[in-house]
Amino acid sequence: MRPARALIDLAALRHNYRLARELGGRKALAVVKADAYGHGAVRCARALEPEADGFGVACIEEALELREAGIRAPILLLEGFFDAAELALVEAHDLWFVVQADWQIDAIERARPAKPFTVWLKLDSGMHRLGLAAHEYRAALQRLQAMAQVGEVVAMTHFARADELDCDRTEQQLALFNQVCVEASLPTSLENSPALLGWPDVQGDWSRPGLMLYGASPFAGPHPLADRLRPVMTVESGIISVRDLDAGESVGYGARFVTRRPSRIGVVAMGYADGYPQFVPNGTPVAIDGHPGDLVGRVSMDMLTVDLTDHPAAGLGSRVELWGAQVRVHDLAARCETSAYQLLCALKRVPRHYLDE
Ligand SMILES: Cc1ncc(COP(=O)(O)O)c(C=O)c1O
């Protein structure tokens, strides 16, 4: 059997959730959209459900998957509903949703739910993706609060640059949120992972941690709180072929690596079809039987190559960690000009194995 696998440590997931709750102070909505950032939404939600205050998903399909798996905790549709017909499912499955545009308010007005909806009214405080502009917000809120169709309203916004700790954009967004929303004395929700970890002055009633639950840091460098996160996913595979090459021989497609000395090259069953990035530089870190090592050559669809020259004990069947406890996914992301978000979500084909306590 192909030795590639992803180990998912559910105890680490719970540890990270508790850290998010500790930092946010109040309730934390565990963001499990995109199949829990590639970790498996149902398994992650089940592992968190005994302590999680609720879950955040991108769309109704993701919410229904959780409900069908028996998850009873509150589930918030982070992008709201995409068409008015979804409101029947929202009601049937007791979901919460974000209101991010006026047309959604019109649709709510036309609905006749048996029980009022819980809505999170989103302010566009500077992300300029979803949400009502500051000058539209109060009127939208008044409309919602006047409707029998609406029960609790939470005021929310989303930060665009909270991962940049020396950038004042987060403070500007926070100031606008306070100006528009605080007076309304609604429960509030602002913090994503970088805000929880990096912006202690940002506080709300509900935080919305995603990335940090999975043990990855949103920051480019070391950070004392992010360093307390435990990695949840370990992606590993095995060496399926070894060759000895003279100096001056090229390895793989495009001769991206040429040996400078007599070398032992190991071939690992992992490639870009698994979601490993194709264009990583020579020297990208891996761990070979637990020891730091280097990826060399271009990553191909199902295989990649590592330098075993300084790993004389390694050979056929040796275990190679692509990311996990030794190669942190955010460090790998920084090496190949992507993000930990993208690497985690891109993983596919690799069977997942779940580890608990
Ligand atoms: C509205 C909203 N809240 C929270 C999150 C979680 O963000 P993070 O993964 O940075 O914690 C996301 C993710 O993109 C989001 O879109």
Image (cartoon, helix red, strand yellow):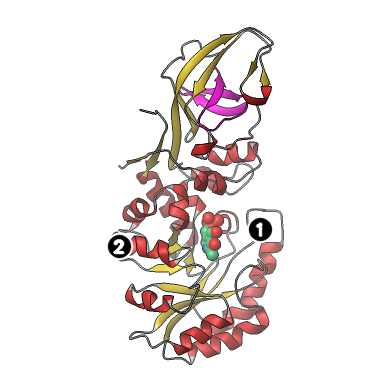
Looking at the rendering, which quadrant does residue 140 occupy?
bottom right
Is residue 256 at least partly visible in the picture? no
Q: Nearer the viewer, residue 62 or 327?
A: 62
Q: Nearer the viewer, mark 1 or mark 2?
A: 2
Left/right placement of residue 221 relative to residue 213 reads right
Give the residue type that dot 2 points to: Glu
Label 2 neighbourhood size at 10 Å, few (<14), some (14-19), many (20+)? few
Badge 2 residue CB within 8 Å of ligand 1: no
Q: Is 93 on the left-hand or right-hand side of 170?
A: left
Q: Residue at x 46, y 15 (%)?
A: 314
Above or below for 113 versus 213: below
| Picture layout, residue 207 above or below residue 270 | below
Q: Residue at x 66, y 74 (%)?
A: 176
Residue where numbered disc 1 is placed: 161
Q: Which residue is mark 2?
A: 68
Spot occupied by residue 247 in the image (x, y as percentages of width and height): 67, 8
In screen coordinates, is 142 left or right of 247? left
Q: Which residues make up the magenta segment?
A: 283-308
Looking at the image, can residue 296 be seen? Answer: yes
Badge 1 local density, few (<14 within 10 Å), some, or many (20+)?
A: some
Where, quadrant-wise, is the N terminus in this rendering?
A: top left
Residue 193: horizontal and vertical position, in percent? 54, 56
Quarter residue 171 falls in: bottom right
